[in-house]
């Protein structure tokens, strides 16, 4: 059983940004931060199956591919990397790339990497806030400049770069060719309204990704039967003993989290393991009492205090990341 205020770890990246408001007010000696990883606060805790992060881009990221489970395990890694993106903000010309314009042979892909034409073969698409992109393992992809993205992924740093915009970092051509689906990819993601408060963004064998919209001063209970992450995008909530505001996240597992939305309501993201949505993930407090068969519990609105930062900066090199 666990309910924890997630630790936010800031990672410097050459393509990152200095101003990350409203997602984070933490400073890092004026340097650019490209990613914020949400982690369990206890370093000795078991590694979660999922990684929830924020990406901030001032430059385009590398064209890359992640391996599936089978290929990753053949390399001695525990699993591959399927991921999903939820666009939080986008500059007017921001775009992402997903898949190739046409199917290539391995030799054709190798030649495209060698002569740089891979950058013209990927399919770029303009994106805007609230867009959802699903990136199965094996999909060649890239993220452009001017974006803030919430990314959910299998916990893995297995990344094979094909093109890096002249940054002189190592490419991983042969592994990429072996791991990639060398052809077009499906952009279309169909979201589904599960309840008035829950919108299903992505459901895969590895994770479920949802958007949560809570009305002002409403009281709820979240059933975190599986590994569950909860990220506040706007507004504020009390969750268990913690007050969460924009950019704060919660980790819970095998536990029940009492949630009370603040005076302006809350918009957030919920992510959890498993291949299908949990039907009773979020219940109104009164409804849950009725299900449990007990008398209604009093719901007292919490006092919301000013935000305190929970961000740790790191300069640890992450060569295989982006």
Image (cartoon, rainbow, N blue to C red):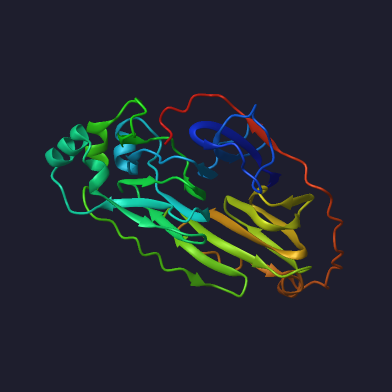
User: Along the horizontal axis of the image, is 141 left or right of 315?
Assistant: left
Above/below status of 1 relative to 277: above
User: Along the horizontal axis of the image, is 34 left or right of 127?
Assistant: right
Image location of residue 19, percent across then percent down: 62, 40
Image location of residue 256, percent across then percent down: 70, 57
Residue at image x 22%, y 54%? 101
Q: Count numbered badges in the picture.
A: 0
Q: Nearer the viewer, residue 201 or 308?
A: 308
For residue 195, what is the image quadrant?
A: bottom right
**Residue 269 visible to an observer of this rendering:** yes
**Residue 180 visible to an observer of this rendering:** no
Image location of residue 211, percent across then percent down: 57, 62
Image location of residue 291, percent across then percent down: 71, 73
Q: Nearer the viewer, residue 248 or 77?
A: 248
For residue 296, what is the image quadrant?
A: bottom right
Residue at image x 23%, y 42%? 118
Above/below status of 255 relative to 117: below
Could you tell me which quadrant the C terminus lies in? top left
Q: Nearer the viewer, residue 92 or 114?
A: 92
User: Along the horizontal axis of the image, is 261 left or right of 208?
Assistant: right
Q: Nearer the viewer, residue 135 or 21?
A: 21
Residue at image x 17%, y 52%? 103
For residue 174, what is the image quadrant?
A: top left
User: Along the horizontal axis of the image, is 211 left or right of 244?
Assistant: left
Residue sitting farthest toward the front: 92
């Amino acid at each position: 059983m666990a309910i924890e205020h997630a630790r936010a770890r800031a990672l410097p990246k050459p393509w990152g940004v200095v101003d990350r408001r409203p997602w984070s007010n933490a400073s890092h000696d004026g340097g650019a931060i490209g990613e914020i990883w949400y982690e369990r606060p206890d370093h000795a805790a078991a590694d979660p199956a999922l990684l929830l992060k924020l990406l901030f881009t001032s430059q385009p990221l590398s064209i890359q591919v992640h391996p599936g489970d089978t290929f990753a395990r053949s390399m001695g890694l525990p699993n591959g990397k399927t991921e999903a993106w939820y666009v939080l903000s986008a500059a007017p010309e921001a775009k992402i790339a997903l898949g190739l314009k046409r199917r290539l042979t391995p030799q054709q892909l190798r030649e495209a990497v060698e002569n740089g034409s891979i950058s013209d073969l990927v399919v770029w698409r303009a994106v805007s806030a609230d867009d959802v992109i699903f990136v199965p393992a094996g999909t060649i992809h890239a993220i452009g400049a001017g974006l803030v993205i919430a990314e959910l992924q299998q916990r893995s740093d297995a990344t094979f770069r094909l093109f890096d915009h002249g940054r002189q970092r190592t490419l991983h051509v042969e592994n990429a060719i072996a791991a990639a689906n060398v052809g077009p990819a499906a952009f279309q993601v169909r979201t589904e309204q599960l309840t008035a408060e829950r919108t299903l963004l992505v459901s895969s064998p590895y994770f479920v990704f949802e958007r949560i919209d809570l009305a002002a001063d409403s009281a709820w209970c979240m059933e975190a039967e599986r590994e569950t992450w909860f990220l506040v995008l706007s507004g504020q909530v009390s969750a268990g003993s913690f007050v969460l505001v924009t950019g704060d996240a919660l980790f819970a597992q095998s536990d029940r989290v009492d949630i009370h939305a603040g005076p302006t309501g809350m918009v957030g993201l919920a992510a959890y393991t498993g291949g299908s949505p949990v039907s009773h993930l979020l219940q109104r407090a009164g409804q849950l009492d009725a299900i449990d068969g007990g008398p209604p519990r009093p719901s007292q609105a919490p006092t919301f205090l000013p935000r305190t930062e929970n961000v740790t900066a790191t300069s640890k090199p992450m060569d295989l990341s982006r």
